[in-house]
Image (cartoon, grey):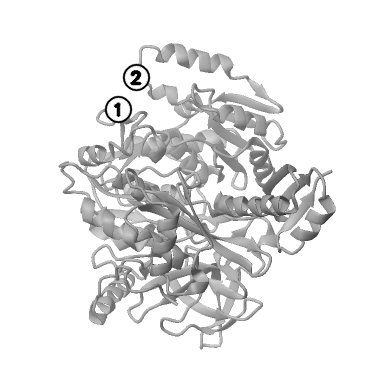
């Protein structure tokens, strides 16, 4: 049941307008029946884009926010030469078509050289530098890389310490290549700091030789690849996908995956991003597909200009407060972010900067609250285009049309050359029928942008949906695991994710319903609803709220507000807790698993208190095999506490 009508409704659009915009998608497909054409790999796509405007800027990079007016700039000709040199250098190290190059890096020009040069030579594996060393080791041993590219010892960064600790336990590694951001430091102490970094870097790490990347690249041929390039169906990259339990799955993507999705996106935006002088901003981390494809391969495929803002991206000191100055100076056409980025930018709205070129803010990775849409567009004048996609589909599968009215709250129309639909499945995940108009089903996608599957074949169980097409053939669709519906005009609306649904007494509650109601409150910046274990109902909804800067609201006020906004009593929160900041992933997406673990531990503490015993230990963790587990030990009454906890569905482990 939807919340009551005090929520701001999305603007009404006539059916004719919606149909016309869907017709635009069909027209794009009809105008270019062969999406990929002669392009065989990501290297050739970059090469084709560079040939459009070889002497125009391809990438501008600034190390610190205060340096943004004097960035280091590469033309398309120079940029392509660096990527070519990287590819040839990796091949000279013995990297073959099926060999893996892992990287643990922040956002640096060398990160891009590693990605695109690495894909030409072998397979590139992106690893989040915020992970702990033990998890880095597990991931690398699963992928068996021959080469690791990582940060050299650098003041203020712990990447080298973690990456080197992890790499020492990866037998497949033969080479560790280091990259130093101090190369770009403009300071009188820079030469000394670079010398110290070299002094701290060993020459050997276990069985792997350690050496700097830049000299290897600089000596390699820059005019052309010294070997035969990959084909469309060769593997291009490995990516860790998001997940709430266990070790992340490793997605295997082909060159077709990435080339197709970049061309689909480029066609969707059309002339808005094509050509010299069209600048886009990359502030999301380059171990994520959004940064690599959306603000990397896509603009470069059409000869546009990417501005890479500091190694930390949006997390860099001072970048958010100065973002509008940076956007005006570099004349951004669009930037990409997640809801937490837009919420942070609202704390520092524009103040008279010339933003006449800035048209779009693309939002993905998590649904954006409708009220945040209105606030951002009202206060900045920038049009938000919410989209939807996943690593397994390249990057983006749907987006609100850049050239038409966006339906706020919708994830937009399917991209050209992709199919997207809502299916009704049986209990085993098999196709029963296509969902009716506005009927909620499981979202599924198909097209040339789909990945090959997961590296661990066991993870592919239930991934694909076989659907008859009416011609006696069976089509293979990717089960996204997300719930959504398609309206009469072709727009898709995300209604929740199966694993995020709160199940209260057998009643499914969409957390988005609760979150949207709270986002209407003027003091609320962000809200995250999760299920709290309940001995009677299974789960009850609780909400964590982050307030807007300079605003105040008590938990009692927010509870009263929620109950007046949510017409469905079962969805009324059991508790609302105001926190200073919500936990987020490295790309700024609210990390609900951390909140869920807090709730599990809280339940154990409350049950212990009810028994009148003290806890000596209580820790909720994500176990790679068992999922969420609470480990605990009480001062006494351990058997009684264990019996009380047995009433809940979560796993527990009594420590001794």
Front-most of 656 and 420? 656
Residue 323 position within the rendered picture, expressed as x and y whole percent measured from the top left: 28, 40
Q: CA distance from mark 2 to mark 1?
A: 9 Å
Between discs 2 and 1, the one toward the N terminus: 1
Q: Residue at x 56, y 88 (%)?
A: 472
Depth order, front residue of 466/587: 587
Q: Quadrant of residue 272?
A: bottom left
Q: Secondary structure at mark 1?
A: helix
Q: Residue 48: tell me if it is visible.
A: no
Badge 2 marks a residue whose secondary structure is: loop
Residue 40, image x and y in percent? 45, 55
Identify the residue shown where x is 49% and y is 21%: 155
Q: Which residue sits at x=33%, y=47%? A: 551
Placement of 15 over or under 185, stated as above or below: below
- Residue 316: which disc? none
Rendered-image quadrant of the N terminus = bottom left
Where on the picture, by quarter, is residue 85?
Answer: top left
Residue named by callout 2? 186
Q: Is residue 388 left or right of residue 538?
A: left
User: Badges 2 and 1: C-beta atoms under 8 Å apart?
Assistant: yes
Q: Residues within 10 Å of mark 2 (few under 14, many from 20)?
A: few
x, y (%) of residue 629?
A: 71, 53
Residue 645 on image: x %, y %: 75, 58
Farthest front residue in view: 612
Whether 6 is drawn above or below 641: the answer is below
Asked if one can make out residue 245 in the rendered structure from this viewpoint, the answer is yes
According to the image, label 1 marks what residue?
67
**Image quarter (top left, top right, bottom left or bottom right) of the C terminus:** top right
């Amino acid at each position: 049941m939807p919340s009551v009508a005090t929520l701001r409704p999305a603007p009404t659009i006539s059916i004719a307008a919606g149909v016309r915009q869907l017709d635009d998608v069909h027209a794009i497909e009809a105008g270019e029946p062969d999406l990929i054409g002669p392009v065989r790999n990501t290297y050739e796509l970059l090469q084709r884009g560079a040939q459009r405007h070889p002497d125009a800027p391809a990438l501008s990079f600034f190390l610190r926010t205060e340096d943004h007016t004097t960035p280091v700039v590469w033309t398309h000709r120079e940029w392509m030469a660096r990527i070519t040199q990287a590819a040839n250098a990796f091949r000279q190290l013995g990297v073959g078509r099926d060999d893996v190059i892992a990287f643990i890096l922040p956002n640096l020009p060398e990160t891009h050289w590693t990605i695109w040069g690495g894909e030409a030579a072998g397979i590139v594996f992106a690893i989040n530098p915020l992970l702990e060393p033990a998890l880095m080791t597990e991931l690398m041993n699963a992928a068996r890389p021959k080469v690791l590219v990582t940060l050299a010892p650098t003041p203020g960064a712990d990447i080298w310490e973690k990456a080197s600790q992890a790499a020492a336990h990866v037998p497949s590694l033969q080479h560790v290549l280091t990259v130093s951001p101090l190369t770009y430091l403009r300071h009188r102490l820079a030469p000394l700091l670079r010398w110290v970094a070299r002094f701290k870097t060993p020459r050997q790490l276990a069985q792997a030789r350690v050496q700097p990347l830049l000299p290897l690249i600089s000596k390699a041929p820059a005019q052309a690849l010294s070997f035969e390039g990959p084909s469309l169906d060769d593997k291009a990259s490995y990516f860790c996908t998001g997940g709430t339990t266990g070790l992340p799955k490793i997605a295997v993507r082909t060159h077709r995956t990435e080339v197709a999705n970049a061309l689909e996106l480029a066609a969707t935006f059309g002339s808005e991003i094509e050509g010299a002088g069209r600048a886009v901003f990359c502030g999301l981390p380059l171990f994520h597909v959004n940064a690599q494809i959306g603000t990397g391969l896509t603009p470069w495929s059409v000869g546009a200009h990417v501005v890479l803002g500091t190694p930390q991206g949006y997390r860099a000191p001072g970048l958010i407060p100065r973002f509008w100055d940076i956007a005006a100076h570099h004349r951004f056409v669009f930037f990409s972010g997640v809801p937490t980025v837009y919420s942070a930018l609202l704390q520092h709205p524009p103040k008279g900067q010339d933003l006449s070129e800035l048209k779009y803010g693309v939002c993905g990775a998590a649904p954006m609250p409708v009220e945040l849409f209105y606030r951002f567009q009202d206060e900045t004048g920038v049009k938000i285009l919410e989209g939807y996609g996943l690593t397994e589909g390249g990057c983006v599968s749907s987006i609100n049309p850049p050239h038409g009215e966006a339906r706020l709250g919708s994830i937009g129309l399917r991209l050209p050359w992709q199919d997207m639909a809502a299916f009704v499945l049986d209990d085993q995940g098999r196709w029963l029928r296509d969902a009716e108009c506005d009927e909620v089903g499981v979202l599924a996608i198909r097209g040339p942008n789909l990945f090959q599957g997961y590296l661990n074949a066991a993870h592919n169980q239930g991934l694909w949906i076989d659907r008859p097409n009416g011609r006696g053939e069976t089509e293979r669709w990717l089960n996204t695991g997300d719930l959504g519906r398609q309206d009469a005009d072709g727009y898709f609306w995300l209604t929740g994710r199966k694993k995020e649904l709160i199940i209260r007494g057998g009643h499914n509650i969409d957390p988005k319903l609760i979150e949207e109601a709270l986002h209407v409150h003027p003091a609320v910046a962000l809200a995250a609803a999760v299920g709290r274990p309940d001995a009677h109902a299974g789960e009850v909804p609780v909400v964590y709220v982050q307030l807007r800067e300079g605003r105040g609201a008590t938990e009692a006020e927010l509870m009263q507000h929620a109950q007046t906004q949510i017409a469905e009593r079962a969805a009324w929160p059991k508790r609302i807790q105001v926190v200073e900041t919500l936990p987020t992933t490295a790309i700024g997406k609210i990390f609900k698993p951390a909140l869920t673990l807090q709730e599990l531990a809280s339940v154990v503490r409350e049950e212990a208190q009810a028994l009148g015993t003290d806890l000596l230990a209580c820790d909720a963790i994500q176990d790679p095999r068992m999922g969420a587990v609470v480990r605990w030990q009480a001062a006494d009454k351990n058997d009684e506490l264990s019996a009380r906890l047995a009433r809940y569905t979560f796993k527990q482990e009594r420590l001794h």
